[in-house]
Image: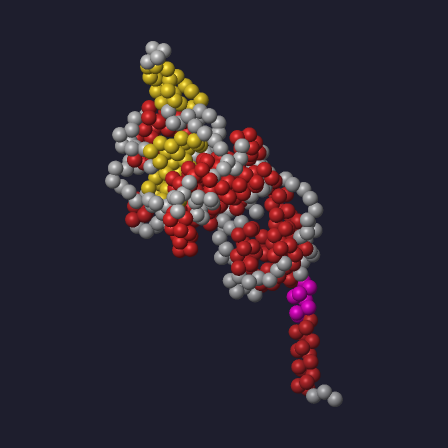
């Protein structure tokens, strides 16, 4: 795990050259990548979501593409499609921006559901199918999507099925007063992303991802995960509990988090620490329960769940 | 010659010492743990008897953090080392020598705390 700790330190150091603060968010993005998951960054506008995603991708030295989602987009703008090559007079496949190791889907909830759905296959199966032809995407493949939480004008909320594909939802709040000052100071001079150097080679990343697969998660902890899932589904305040896919993601993410901490095994604390990021966006509360004040938010509900389900000790 | 009052006071004092001795030797002190697992098993029982309002979902690490925050005195460095060794063994199947005496002492102190519960 030495290499992984070195990669973590280097990624943090490189992103810190441009982005002020956000160390925890960088850790979560690393966890997402190492567990072969995708991340949804959510927060009010202007909280460095896109900047961090760009810097993070740069530190990895992987191929990176960015798509600004708009209401008039078509699926082929993301996955690509067949076009006529005027030189060869042949129809050939032109790859869309999804053919990259890291895809930044900026303001994903600004595009209509048809375009959002085009990403589903890519995110779940790391491949795309266009007119019956299936093509594999590069490995590792990671979608980092951003969405603004307060804007409602021209926004299409992500459906549950789409949200379920994101391993983690990472909230971006405002930073403290001291950091706010540093942000302003740093932005007074020209910022150049070229100062960021790759923090890891592709081989190192692949090796780290293979290492994460070897992290032990004991049968007791698998049972703990199953009991958490059961609790979220049976609670009368909930419309939609954690899906089996969500629990699989939580297991993978907890392993990556343990590896990031230099451990070869998962503890109940890893699961509890990662659960809000993995399950928070997938749990749908009953509107009546919220209106009656029985529960305030999915995060509040999760805190209840984690306080009541006994972990193995 | 001692007066009757002085004799009564002496008698009561001796009785109190005997009762305290019995309580310390019999009720509170149990044989120290013989292994890391036993130490943490005793600690778990002691924590939840001393602080019954702790949520069921707490992990041992969270409970220990709660104790530390409450101002409980212990060699927390040693306890952290023991906890890491215990977690490695319990969840990672790792074997290795480790100290657990301080965990045993903490469990014992918590049992006394539970006896005079102030939670």
Number of residue marks: 0
Q: In this view, does A30 lie above or below B58?
A: above
Q: Which residue lies furthest to the front in this view?
A: A189
Residue A23 visible in the current orientation:
yes
Q: Nearer the viewer, residue A130 or A222?
A: A130
Chain part drawn in magenta? B19-26
Q: Where is residue A241 in the image (x, y as percent from the top left)?
A: 39, 39
Q: Which colour scheme is used?
A: secondary structure
Of residue A111 and residue A239, the one placed in the foreground of this image is: A111
Q: In this view, does A188 lie to the left or right of B60?
A: left
Specify the quadrant of the image occupied by residue A39.
top left
Task: Residue at 69% x, 83% y: name it.
Answer: B7
In the rendered image, which quarter contains the N terminus of chain B? bottom right
Which residue shows up at 27% across the image and 32% down it? A71
Taking the spot 72% from the left edge, 87% from the top edge, the residue there is B2
Viewer can see residue A227: no
Residue B22 colored magenta? Answer: yes
Q: Provide residue A64's location: percent of width, then percent of height.
A: 43, 31
Task: Classify residue A118 as left or right of residue B29.
Answer: left
Q: Residue A271, percent across and down?
A: 50, 43
In the rendered image of this protein, does residue A32 appear above or below residue A90?
A: below
Residue lying at 29% horizontally and 29% vertically, measured from the top left: A73
Rendered position, B34 above or below B27 = above
Left or right, residue B84 beside residue A189 = right
Residue furthest left in the image: A153
| Percent position of residue A273, x then y | 48, 45
The image quadrant of residue A44 is: top left
- Report whether B46 appears left or right of A169: right
Q: What secondary structure do most residues of the magenta stretch adopt?
A: helix
Residue A75 forms part of the magenta stretch: no
In the picture as drawn, the residue positioned furthest to the top comes out as A89
């Amino acid at each position: 795990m030495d290499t992984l700790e070195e990669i973590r330190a280097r990624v943090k150091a490189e992103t810190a050259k441009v982005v002020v603060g956000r160390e925890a968010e960088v850790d979560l993005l690393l966890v997402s990548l190492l567990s072969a998951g995708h991340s949804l960054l959510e927060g009010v506008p202007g909280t460095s979501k896109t900047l961090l995603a760009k810097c993070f991708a740069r530190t990895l030295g992987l191929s990176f593409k960015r798509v600004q989602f708009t209401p008039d987009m078509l699926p082929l703008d993301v996955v690509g499609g067949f076009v006529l090559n005027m030189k060869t007079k042949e129809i050939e496949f032109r790859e869309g921006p999804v053919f990259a190791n890291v895809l930044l889907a900026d303001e994903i909830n600004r595009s209509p559901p048809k375009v959002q759905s085009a990403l589903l296959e890519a995110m779940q199966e790391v491949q795309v199918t266009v007119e019956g032809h299936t093509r594999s995407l590069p490995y590792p493949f990671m979608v980092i999507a951003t969405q603004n939480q307060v804007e409602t004008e021209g926004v299409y909320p992500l459906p549950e099925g789409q949200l379920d594909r994101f391993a983690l939802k990472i909230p971006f709040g405002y930073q403290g007063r001291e950091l706010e000052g540093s942000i302003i100071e740093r932005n007074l001079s020209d910022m150049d992303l070229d100062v960021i150097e790759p923090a890891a080679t592709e081989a190192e990343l692949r090796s780290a991802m293979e290492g994460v697969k070897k992290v032990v998660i004991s049968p007791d902890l698998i049972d703990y995960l199953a009991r958490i899932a059961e609790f979220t589904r049976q609670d009368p305040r909930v419309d939609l509990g954690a899906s089996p896919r969500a629990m699989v993601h939580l297991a993978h993410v907890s392993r990556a988090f343990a590896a990031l901490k230099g451990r070869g095994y998962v503890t109940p604390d890893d699961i509890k620490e990662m659960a809000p990021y993995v399950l928070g966006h997938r749990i749908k509360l009953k509107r009546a329960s919220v209106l009656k004040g029985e529960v305030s938010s999915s995060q509040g509900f999760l805190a209840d769940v984690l306080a009541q389900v006994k972990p193995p000790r | 010659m001692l007066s009757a009052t002085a004799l009564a006071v002496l008698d009561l004092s001796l009785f109190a010492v005997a009762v305290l001795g019995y309580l310390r030797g019999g009720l509170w002190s149990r044989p120290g743990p013989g292994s890391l697992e036993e130490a943490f098993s005793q600690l778990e029982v002691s924590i939840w008897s001393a602080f019954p309002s702790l949520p069921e979902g707490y992990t041992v690490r969270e409970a220990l953090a709660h104790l530390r925050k409450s101002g409980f005195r212990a060699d927390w460095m040693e306890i952290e080392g023991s906890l890491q060794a215990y977690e490695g063994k319990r969840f990672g199947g790792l074997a290795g020598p480790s100290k657990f005496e301080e965990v045993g002492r903490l469990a014992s102190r918590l049992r006394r705390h539970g006896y005079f519960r102030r939670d």
